[in-house]
Image: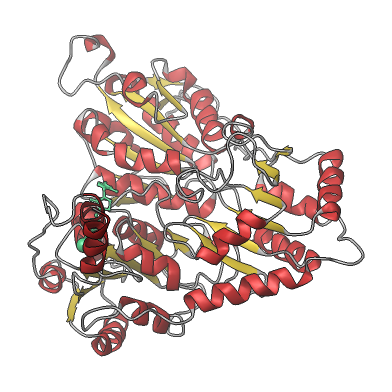
Amino acid sequence: MRANDGTRTAAEVLIDQLLIHGVRHVFCVPGESYIAALDAFHDRDIAITVCRHESGATIMAETCGKTTGRPGICFVTRGPGATNAAAGLHIAQQDSTPLILFVGQIAREMREREAFQELDYRAVFGSIAKWATEIDDPMRIPELVSRAFHTATGGRPGPVVIALPEDMLVERIAVPDAPAFEPVETWPGASDMARLQKLLWAAERPIVLLGGSRWSQAACATVTRFAERFALPVATTFRRAHLFAPDHPCYAGDLGIGPNPKLLARIRGADLIVLIGGRLGEQPSQAYTLLDIPAPRQTFVHVYPGVEELGRVYRPHLAINATPTAFAAALEGIEPPPDVPWRKEAAGAHADFLAWTDKPTAVPGAVNLGEIIVALREKIPSDAVICNGAGNFSVWVHRYARYRRYGTQLAPISGSMGYGVPAAVGMKRLDPKRMVIAFAGDGDFLMTGQEFATAVQYELPVIVIVVDNGMYGTIRMHQERHYPGRVVATGLRNPDFAAYARAFGGYGATVEKTADFFPAFEAARACGLPAILHVKVDPEALTPAMSLSAIREKALAQG
Ligand SMILES: Cc1ncc(C[n+]2csc(CCOP(=O)(O)OP(=O)(O)O)c2C)c(N)n1
Ligand SMILES: [Mg+2]
């Protein structure tokens, strides 16, 4: 509140800037270092979600950024709060998600003495954040917060860190607010689009790859129209499957971990690749083996919102510095050749995708995760959000789940375990009407599973499916491949996850065979509580294609 003399505390000025920039949700773990900022939330119309760990809080904020395209906001305390938050910051960096992390900081007069929990945030987060700063002069809060919103969302989005000295936050100041920010769109030039049309007219086997952030429902719809008009096969890159409808006859599949070999062959055999929005990092590029570096054999068109990425690894024949949203709109202005020579390619690519994903493979044990996920397709609404963390269980999720709309997939491009539960909680907090499901491994779940308490606290009925194989399966798989039979530090002795759910005040059920899954799922859905379904899978079922023993035997046979 402004006093009669027109002053507010610096903390109030700060929170007013958030309101002006459109913030409606904030995620935090409280700390005495920013108690004045917490107080300023008291009379302001922003929903605060108090979390159990800063990694959960930053992941929830990251989810907010991923879903809305506007910075997710997180507040944590100095030192240990900030280092705990590093998990979410790194995800925001690798996933190109706008995020602003506010960190309480020691009082200005104590700096450089290594006061209690003192850290130099510029130094600590300098290589993770797009920008890390500290606000010394409260009069500059409107300027620096405005810059943070522009920096987090501009070009390739990412995280910004702002440290707030606690004595600065309580100063009283009279300062005008900044105007609301708008994310900056970068538009392709007319000559870019003319060159793209020319390349398409000269192509025989083109393919489109979609990835990255800065998309929207409208941009996805426009790219779909483009694919239809040009009869182009369209694949999505690692954990960005929600950018193109899986049932569409142009959809060629997911270029992630363990992709369809036919999709890889199709990309290798293409003569024109149009990559829109993505970076083609280590996972989609199959450890940088898919395209030649620096000069791909195929004609390579790269459309990307951040200019520094264009030519960083792959030298494009045509580089277009544009946001996917702006580029998609410009696609309406180009025309397909009179007779599309590759017309049959899209249908073939889609048939390959269906053959790869329609029916689950057989796996050892009484639970077939593939069968569960395939059956789930028809049981959940088309706008249901499917979240997951990292681990081999996610290979089934990415292969068999159907992400039917933009924004229905929340998964860490960074491969950060522990993502699924806080992502689901953050998403449900943002949009309580949507069904939100999280898949987690047994290892993955316990990295951030305590945020289940946050789901209970805010009455958010997410459904968490814990896929328990009693091990850090991915690492065991690598062990069996490289050091067959030599098992070190990958076994896990797990709790009863259903009882864990009940202890928190949620719903819990154990699933020991495939047929038991749906009754448990329906009961979870009906009870209206946050739920955990503890799905016990056979450790032999290590991948959809190969059992644990088969991986070991193959490695032993190869010597
Ligand atoms: C935060 C984090 N720590 C460690 C890893 C390395 N890592 C990748 S997958 C994995 C095992 C995952 O185990 P689990 O969640 O049980 O899934 P599973 O592979 O068994 O299906 C580990 C340890 C990681 N990706 N992220
Ligand atoms: Mg596991």
In the image as oriented, which residue stretches furthest toward the right? 338
Q: Is residue 513 left or right of residue 177?
A: left
Question: At which x and y percent is residue 151?
Answer: 54, 31
Number of labelled discs?
0
Between 417 and 44, the one lying in front of the other is: 417
Q: Residue at x 55, y 59 (%)?
A: 264
Q: Is residue 508 visible?
A: yes
Q: Quadrant of residue 12?
A: top left
**Where is the N terminus found, in terms of image quarters?**
top left
Query: What colour scheme governs how the chains and residues are painted in the rendered image of this protein?
Result: secondary structure
Q: Residue at x 57, y 34 (%)?
A: 313
Between 96 and 284, the one lying in front of the other is: 284
| Image vertical order of residue 10 relative to residue 548, above or below | above
Q: Is residue 151 left or right of residue 333?
A: left
Q: Residue at x 28, y 69 (%)?
A: 464
Q: Is residue 284 left or right of residue 215?
A: left
Q: Quadrant of residue 350?
A: bottom right
Q: Residue at x 61, y 54 (%)?
A: 268
Question: At which x and y percent is residue 84?
Answer: 24, 38
Between 280 and 245, the one lying in front of the other is: 280
Question: At which x and y percent is residue 402?
Answer: 49, 73
| Image vertical order of residue 535 relative to residue 300, above or below | below
Question: At which x and y percent is residue 357?
Answer: 48, 75
Q: Quadrant of residue 309?
A: top right
Q: Is residue 247 visible?
A: no
Q: Is residue 100 left or right of residue 108?
A: right
Between 342 and 402, the one lying in front of the other is: 342
